[in-house]
Each structure stands twice: as structure tokens, then as C-alpha cells.
Amino acid sequence: MSETTNYTVTGMTCGHCVASVTEEIAQIGGVSEVSVHLETGRVTVTSTAPVALDDVRAAVAEAGYELAG
């Protein structure tokens, strides 16, 4: 069974931004798919188990951005 969670990332302006965020989040254990929509900043993460918000926040920060909210 998979879990799907949506987040909003602020500060992304180009395809490189999307690639960086995707790459960092994809490295979190259990994450099977990451979809990033540049125009809205929406990030959809599909995983095999719940992913800790702090892990996602840290991955996004490593990419140079931050989660909204």
C-alpha cells in the first residue's frame, strides 16, 4: 500500500529547481515517486510508508528551498 502526501515548496523558478527538489526528496527512505509542479510549487510524494515532515523539510532545505507553512 502506498501513501501520497502533498506539500508546497516556495522559491522555485526553473526546471533546475524542480530537478534539485525532486532529487533530494527521492533520496528519503521509502519514497517511490516525486512529482513537482513548478508553477504552483506543489510537490506530491508517494511512498511505501508515511514520510516524516522533518525529513521532507530537510530534503527541501538541502535543495535550497523551503516548505510553505
Image: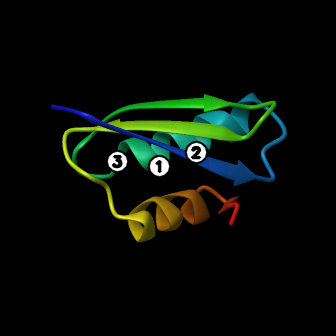
Residue at the location (78% across, 45% down)? 12
> Where does the C terminus fall, quadrant-wise?
bottom right
Residue 62 rendering spot, x and y as whole percentages: 55, 63
The residue wearing badge 3 is 27
* Residue contact at pointers 1 and 2, CB within 8 angstroms: yes
User: Could you give the CA–CA distance between mark 1 and mark 3, rounded to whole angstroms?
Assistant: 5 Å
Q: Which mark is residue 21?
A: 2
State yes or no: discs 2 and 3 in contact (Cβ < 8 Å). Answer: no
The quadrant of the rendering that contains the N terminus is top left
Q: Amino acid at mark 3?
A: Gln
Question: Could you tell me residue 51's position as x and y percent?
Answer: 31, 55
To which residue does mark 1 refer? Answer: 24
Q: Which quadrant of the structure image shows residue 55? A: bottom left
Labelled pair 1, 3 in contact (Cβ < 8 Å) = yes
Q: Residue furthest left?
A: 1
Left-right relation of 20 to 33: right
Instruction: Please state which amino acid type lies under the numbered disc 1.
Output: Glu
